[in-house]
Image: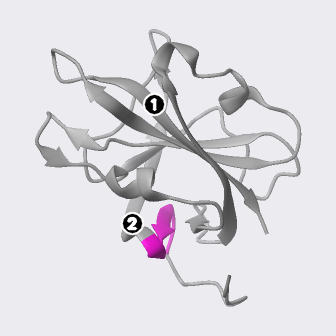
């Protein structure tokens, strides 16, 4: 893997995955009625319960759509193509850039999404969460795709 040590300039609150063509704004994503409120197709949401990207332990969770209203390409549409070693850059509200390396990409039913994705307390991990799998009646996907990355 050829990874430069130089960090890109992103501005504040950005998600950038050059290999996958993802470059989008990050907005706050609160929980309402027990569900994460994911923004519209062109942005991703950072779970408001996330730790900071520079934390030593915990999870920073970013969620976004693959499709919006069943027809518009979502900001995280390419994330299912992430592989071990894919580099992810995120910036915080001050514009500080952090670099992460994908370690795992997993697809699971939404009901099987482990609490560790949100509440893990071991080493700091970035979790990117989107929909995947079969599209059910009503336009919702059956599964979630979860990409886990560690800071390096």
Q: Quadrant of residue 133?
A: top left
Residue at image point 68% right, 70% down: 99
> Which mark lies nearer to you, 2 or 1?
1
Q: As drawn, is 79 to the left or to the right of 89? A: left
Mark closest to the chain's N terminus, 2 or 1:
2
Q: In which quarter of the image is residue 116?
A: top right
User: x, y (%) of residue 126?
Assistant: 66, 49
Q: Residue 92 carries which label?
A: none
Q: Is mark 1 on a helix, strand or loop?
A: strand
- How crowded pointer 1 is (Cα within 10 Å; few <14, some 14-19, many 20+) is rated as many
- Residue 152, relative to residue 34: is it above or below? below
- Disc 2 and disc 1: Cα gap in Å? 18 Å
Q: As drawn, is 121 to the left or to the right of 88? A: right
Q: As drawn, is 119 to the left or to the right of 43? A: right
The magenta stretch spans residue 148: no
Q: Could you say which is closer to the camera, residue 102 or residue 95? A: 102
Q: How many marks?
A: 2
The magenta stretch spans residue 17: yes
Q: Is mark 2 on a helix, strand or loop?
A: strand
Q: Could you say which is closer to the camera, residue 28 or residue 42? A: 42
Quadrant the C terminus occupies:
bottom right
Which residues are drawn in magenta? Answer: 11-19
User: x, y (%) of residue 48?
Assistant: 58, 35
- Residue 64, relative to residue 96: is it above or below? above
Residue at image point 14% right, 35% down: 70
User: x, y (%) of residue 88?
Assistant: 58, 66
User: x, y (%) of residue 33?
Assistant: 44, 9
Quadrant the N terminus occupies:
bottom right
- Residue 1, relative to residue 70: is it above or below? below
Q: Which mark is residue 144?
A: 1
What residue is disc 2 on?
22
């Amino acid at each position: 893997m050829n990874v430069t040590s130089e960090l890109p300039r992103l501005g504040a609150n950005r998600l950038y995955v050059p290999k996958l063509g993802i470059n989008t704004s990050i907005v706050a994503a609160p929980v309402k009625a027990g569900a994460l409120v994911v923004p519209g197709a062109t942005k991703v949401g950072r779970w408001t319960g996330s730790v900071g990207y520079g934390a030593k332990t915990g999870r920073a969770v970013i969620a976004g759509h693959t499709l919006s209203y069943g027809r518009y390409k979502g900001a995280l549409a390419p994330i299912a193509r992430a592989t071990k070693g894919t580099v992810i850059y995120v910036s915080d509200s001050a514009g500080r850039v952090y670099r992460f390396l994908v370690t795992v990409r997993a697809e699971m039913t939404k009901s099987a999404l482990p609490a560790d994705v949100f509440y893990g307390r071991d080493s700091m991990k970035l979790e990117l969460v989107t929909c995947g799998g079969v599209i059910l009646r009503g336009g919702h996907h059956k599964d979630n795709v979860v990409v886990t990355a560690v800071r390096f």
